[in-house]
Amino acid sequence: MSLEPQRDDGERDLQRVSDEVRDRLRARGVDTEPADSPEDVAMLLEAVEEFELAVESHGGDLFVDEPPQGRAAQPDDPRFELPVRTPQETARAYLRRLADATGRIRTISD
């Protein structure tokens, strides 16, 4: 019995999940790059979700702070606007910027 079909199924599952996560990020206005690995994509989603939690915990409204794709943001507080990933920015560099933005939000005193 060959392990090849199982490996192919695992790779297909990984690609399917990665594609779903990319779609979720795109819906939040975060671009992914072909060079982003499945691990990068998963870490990006986790970082975006952490950012969103920080915004919500400080009274931000994600429906206002994160515009639909292709539209300009009109956040109730500019600090709550999700940072835009710049063209050619690596996933790791964007993750650092997201972590910095999340940290700044967490230090806001109410």
Image (spheres, rainbow, N blue to C red):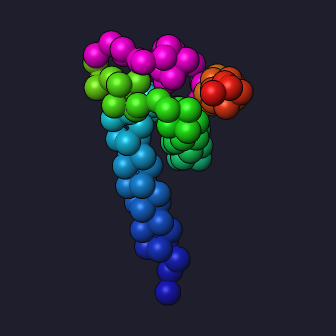
Magenta span has 48? no
Where in the figure is residue 28, as x and y percent of width and height? Answer: 38, 33
Depth check: 54 or 14 in front? 54
Depth check: 56 or 22 in front? 56
Q: Check the image and name the residue furthest to the front.
A: 110
The residue that appears at 38% across and 42% down in the rendered structure is 24
Where in the figure is residue 61, as x and y percent of width and height? Answer: 41, 31
From the image, which quarter does the C terminus lie in?
A: top right
Q: In the drawing, does residue 7 fall left or right of residue 101?
A: left
Tell me: residue 14, above or below residue 85: below
Residue 102 seen from this side = yes
Depth check: 29 or 56 in front? 56
Q: Check the image and name the residue furthest to the bottom.
A: 1
Which of the 4 quarters of the picture holds residue 57? top right
Q: Which residues fall within the magenta stretch? A: 71-94
Q: In the drawing, does residue 103 fall left or right of residue 48?
A: right
Residue 93 seen from this side = no
The residue that appears at 35% across and 41% down in the rendered structure is 23
The residue that appears at 35% across and 25% down in the rendered structure is 64
Tell me: residue 60, above or below residue 84: below
Where in the figure is residue 72, as x and y percent of width and height? Answer: 33, 12
Specify the principal SS of the magenta part.
loop
**Count of picture labels:** 0
Tell me: residue 74, above or below residue 105: above
The residue that appears at 47% across and 29% down in the rendered structure is 60
